[in-house]
Amino acid sequence: MLQHNAPRTHSIHTDMTLQLVSVLVCTCNRYDQVALTIESVLQNDYATFELLIIDQSSDDRTEQVVAMYQHDKRLRYIRTPTRGLGLARSLGIGLADGEIVLMTDDDCVVAGNWISEMVAAHTSYPQAVAVFCDVLPAPHDKTQGFIPSTTIAHDLLMANLYDWCRAGTAQAVLGAGMSVRRSMIEQLGGFDTRLGAGTPLQCAEDTDIAVRALLHGYSVYRTKRVNVIHYGFRNFTETRALMRGYMFGIAAMYGKLLRCGHLQLIPVMLYEILRTLIVPMLQSLGKFQVPPILGRAVALMRGFQAAWKIDLDRSHEVFEPLDSPVIEPNPAPSTESGLSHTKLGIISPQNVSAWFHVLVLMLLLCLGCLSWMALFALGAE
């Protein structure tokens, strides 16, 4: 029988080389992919670990797949009717026996030494709340679509917001290759359950925990010593929707933290806008192409607006975990800009608000540049 809602046993060893480590895989309706993830984790060379499967699926097919591995005593299965990756991660943290909890996604395959390398990073940098590794795209036809991924030039210990910007801000981290210290996460108030895939705010539960750690004097480590392979292919239509959701969630996260009084994030958010919106727009205009960022810009503005409509738990700097109306980015237009190439110069009534948002973002370009200069000067001190 599969183990449902298994309690924590608190069996923690003191020696890091012998310490029980927890691996968390949150899944939702990916019964056709999660088996590869489970197999790759169970084949790891680390001596003592447990694998927790948090299943938010709407049917029993994922449970049937997991049942094939019920003979392995390292595996624990938890079925939950909840929705949202932030909430699933929180449930997993609460049930984990290990002090170090590794996380990957249900469409990823991890390396055989993934657990060992992530634990080694925590051993070397005990002040790090979280460790992130490279997430590489699986082989795919780049003319047909895209797989989210992240790489970094070299290992980096991020100790402040300048380091965060130097690493590439939110683009430098993906929860598909992540590990955390459970005790530190609990001190920070845990994952924000209103963030993440499957929630109205759509993403950023992983980015949020990293930024909150830096704001409170902890470190975040980014390693290249190991990676996971991501099989989450999206066609270009799905990619445009994904990017809008990304901007929506990231803006909501920054808006929430600004509401909590972290005004030092203003230059960081402006730099994020510079990297993800302004620079791509200028590059497209330089090639006499339609800037592929209007949908993203509108989603960003709406995400920031949404952050001011949701109640806060200010003591933990998370959104209150209450039911609320679904807030979504604008429906996907036929192109991400919302205008065809032949109508670039026409401003229709439906697009007035969107273009106004873009103009506001363009006016923020100078502030973004100045903010980056200020961050650079701060890092040089």
Image: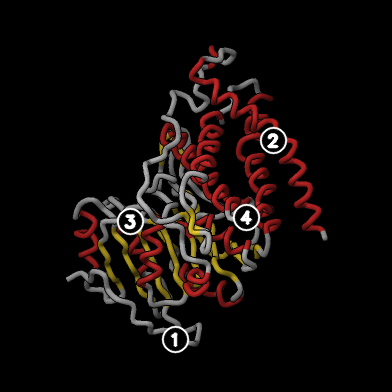
Around disc 3, counting alpha carbons within 10 Å, would you say few (fewer than 14), some (14 to 19), or many (20 or more)? Answer: many
Indicate which disc, 3 or 1, sits on the residue closer to the N terminus.
Answer: 1
Asked if residue 31 lies left or right of residue 341, the reply is left
Separation (CA) of disc 2 from disc 1? 51 Å
What residue sits right under mark 1 in the picture?
Answer: 13
Which of these two is toward me, 129 or 304? 304
Around disc 1, counting alpha carbons within 10 Å, would you say few (fewer than 14), some (14 to 19), or many (20 or more)? Answer: few
Tell me, yes or no, whether the two marked residues, 2 and 3, touch with CB atoms within 8 Å. no
Indicate which disc, 3 or 4, sits on the residue closer to the N terminus.
Answer: 3
Asked if residue 29 lies left or right of residue 353, the reply is left
Tell me, yes or no, whether the two marked residues, 4 and 1, touch with CB atoms within 8 Å. no
Which of these two is toward me, 202 or 158? 202
What residue sits right under mark 4 in the picture?
Answer: 261
What residue sits right under mark 2 in the picture?
Answer: 364
Separation (CA) of disc 2 from disc 3? 39 Å
Which of these two is toward me, 245 or 23? 245
Looking at the rendered image, the disc whose residue lies closer to the viewer, 3 or 4, is 4
Q: Give the image location of residue 219, x and y in percent.
A: 62, 67
Label number found at residue 283: none
Separation (CA) of disc 2 from disc 4? 21 Å
As shown in the figure, which amino acid type bears the numbered disc 1? His
Q: Give the image location of residue 18, x and y in percent.
A: 45, 84
As shown in the figure, which amino acid type bears the numbered disc 2? Leu
What residue sits right under mark 3 in the picture?
Answer: 27
Asked if residue 292 lies left or right of residue 115, the reply is right
Q: Give the image location of residue 273, x and y in percent.
A: 63, 40
Residue 302, compared with residue 192, is above or below; it is above
Indicate which disc, 2 or 4, sits on the residue closer to the N terminus.
Answer: 4
Residue 117 in sight from this viewpoint: no
Q: Secondary structure at mark 2?
A: helix
Residue 166, compared with residue 280, is above or below; it is below
The residue sitting at 19% across, 59% down in the picture is: 64
